[in-house]
Image (cartoon, coloured by chain):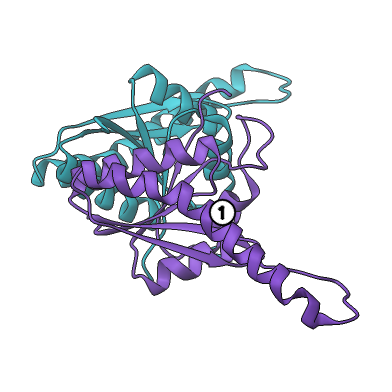
Chain colours: A cyan, B purple
Amino acid sequence: MFKHILVPTDGSELAKAALRKAVQFAKSIGAQLTQVIVDEPFAVIAVDDPLVYLHTQEQYQEATRKRAAEVLKFGEEYAQSEGVRINSVHVYDPVIYLGIITTAKEHRCDLIFMASHGRRGIAALVLGSTTYKVLTHTTLPVLVWRGTN
Amino acid sequence: VFHQLLIAHDGSEPSRIAAHAAIDLAAQLRAQVTLLTVSPPFHIEKAEDPVLLLDVEKDYVTARTHLAQSWLRPCEQYAQSRRVEAASLHVFDDQPWRAIVETAKRAACDLICVGSHGHSGLLTLMLGSTSYRVLVHATVPVLVHRARGE
């Protein structure tokens, strides 16, 4: 049924819990995973001297790349320990939910498995805005994971 | 991973498609399913002699039950063909989302499966109000199946 599951992550505790569950789910139905981190690209609204920001942009890329690698490593290690095939993607998109949906299309995923909130969510009260937007804009089934506490 | 799936069905086409997809998933997970239809309860604003309405209410309940059966039966049969153990429930509640969330708790379901909208959904690109409320209030994960075009 589901063969290729996309798991968006942002390194939050809930996203990690969702990833663990997604790995178990993939294992039980013989599916593979793609985990994705979407970061906003470096943006400068107005600059007097753009040269000043050259270094900053590099630093931003470096910092986000490094953090993404750390977060993705967690998923890779866990999936591998469970014998589930996983690949990792880090993309820049100014609109996070679009980055998620585009990645799902590019990798031909047939299910999006994501936590109800990410880093910016108010715990368990409402549905996170990124999750909500993914739900309203994708044509794929979405499994919204809630922490079990 | 998931052992007991709650499948909500309001008789609409998107919800029928979602129910079948959920049964396919249950077959793969070797999970059991609870099929649920929620109907609006009988309401009369004003009656001079409420006794007169007893039959009306009875007829309403019977008609609603038949309708629910006509949606749930085919799903039960489909589940049987996929060797999935299925139980059907029909409850009356003004708030379908509340009945769905409460039934999931009572039946110890660990995944709720809904369509992206049912009867009152306007656009395929939006999320139906019942599905949205289930997502907000559920204490277990929710699988939202998208309707593809009308």
Quadrant (top left, top right, bottom left, bottom right) of the N terminus of chain A: top left
Side of B127 relative to B80 (left or right): right
* Three-letter residue code for mark 1: Leu
The disc numbered 1 marks a residue on which chain?
A: A
Picture coordinates of residue A118, whole percent (x, y): 48, 50
Q: Quadrant of residue A2?
A: top left
User: Who is closer to the viewer here, B111 or B35?
Assistant: B35
Q: Residue at x 9, y 46 (%)?
A: A81
Q: Residue at x 33, y 20 (%)?
A: A107
Picture coordinates of residue A69, whole percent (x, y): 29, 36
In the image, residue A100 above or below residue B144: above
Picture coordinates of residue B125, whole percent (x, y): 61, 30
Picture coordinates of residue B63, whole percent (x, y): 60, 58
Q: Residue at x 51, y 25 (%)?
A: B148
In the image, residue B101 above or below residue A144: below
Which type of secondary structure does the marked residue at label 1 adopt? loop
Side of B1 relative to B76 (left or right): left
User: Who is closer to the viewer here, B85 or B44?
Assistant: B44
Q: Residue at x 68, y 18 (%)?
A: A49
Side of B40 relative to A111 (left or right): right
Residue A8 visible in rendering: no
Residue matched to label 1 = A127
